[in-house]
Amino acid sequence: MDFQFLQNPISKKWVILSPRRAKRPDIAKGFEPVCPFCPGREKEEKEVYRVGGNDNDSGWQIRVLPNKFPFAPIHEVIVHSPDHHKNFGELPLSAAELIINTYRQRYDAHKDKGQVYIFHNHGEGGGESLPHPHTQLAVIPSDVKMDVPTLASNKEAEAVSEDQITQETKEFIIFCPKTSQWPDEVWISPRKRGRLFGEISDGEVSDLAFTLSRLVQILDLRHGNEFPFNFYIYQGGDWYLRIIPRVKSLGGFEVGTGVFINTQDSQETINFIKEHFENPDEEKIKTSHSATYRKGV
């Protein structure tokens, strides 16, 4: 086996030992191979799911491949589109909607096999090893406890200050927690609570594609082109999507204690998104605002 799940007997926290992943191509190490995700190499890569085209041809819109360097029993790569450069915020909304719909399809395909964790790395600072936009899906055994925050209960949510909400759409509430760990961190929560991600409707898929794309556009303009970020979809009940801009480096205190120091007032993030979500003026964003975060602590 290429990986092991190990539990610290004292802290009870889990670690995945996966030495083989050190051998994967990584642009951060200055090594970028011929892209395995671009059209023309379909016959070289085993496929588990696709949108568009026929088997092994180049007419696809989305492809799902087994990860060659897995750290879980099921570990997939969801290739966003044939375009090597365009990602959320640059792709047409129809393409973004196909990606979200594929997330839902793959979640449902694996939901009875363990904890389905869907995550996206963008940029070297976000842990992206290959630049062709893609998302990963890993199914983690049910007995492995992951340290992932949950949404407040409905009762607790009633006590949440209204000033934490940045924007509301037909299907979602967008907010910035006062307890954010990262500068400009944003959460997307469905209005209809208490469900798994795979239970979202087609209308929610469309709304989420628009909301995620718009937030990436705004944050990209706030922090400069190609800013690094991650997002993930909570793997359990009462799902949400959390966007984490990777615009600071963790210091020794944070690494050693697990207590984060956030150098950005979430209210500034809220104000910025509120100002530009409905009708973003790109030139105005570029000229009238500059990022106010600090990259270190």
Image (cartoon, rainbow, N blue to C red):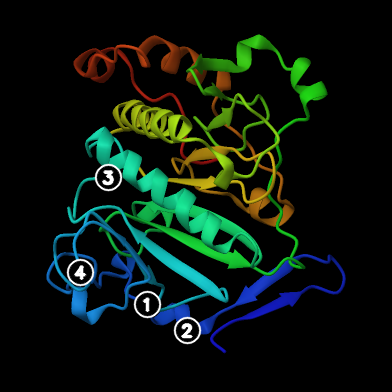
Question: Along the polypeptide, which appears first: circle 3 or circle 1?
Answer: 1
Instruction: Identify the amino acid type marked 1.
Output: Arg
Q: Residue visible at 78% across and 30% down?
A: 153
**Residue 292, image quadrant:** top left
Badge number at residue 87? 3
Instruction: Identify the amino acid type marked 3.
Output: Asn
Mark 3 neighbour class, 10 Å CA radius: few under 14, some 14 to 19, many 20 or more: some
Proximity of marks 1 and 2: CB atoms separated by less than 8 Å: yes
Question: Along the polypeptide, which appears first: circle 2 or circle 4?
Answer: 2
Badge number at residue 24? 1
| Residue 226 shows up from this direction | no
Instruction: Identify the amino acid type marked 4.
Output: Cys
What is the distance, in whole Å, between disc 1 and disc 4 at their CAs? 13 Å
Foreground: disc 1 or disc 4: 4
Instruction: Identify the amino acid type marked 2.
Output: Arg
Instruction: Report the side of 73 relative to 57 (left or right).
Output: right
Residue at numbered disc 2? 20
SS for dot 1: loop
Where residue 192 sits: x, y (%)? 63, 27
Where residue 8 sits: x, y (%)? 79, 73
Where residue 182 sits: x, y (%)? 55, 37
What is the distance, in whole Å, between disc 1 and disc 2 at their CAs? 7 Å
SS for dot 2: helix
Instruction: Report the side of 64 relative to 297 (left or right).
Output: left
Mark 4 neighbour class, 10 Å CA radius: few under 14, some 14 to 19, many 20 or more: few
Residue at numbered disc 4? 35
**Which sits in the foreground, 79 or 7?**
79
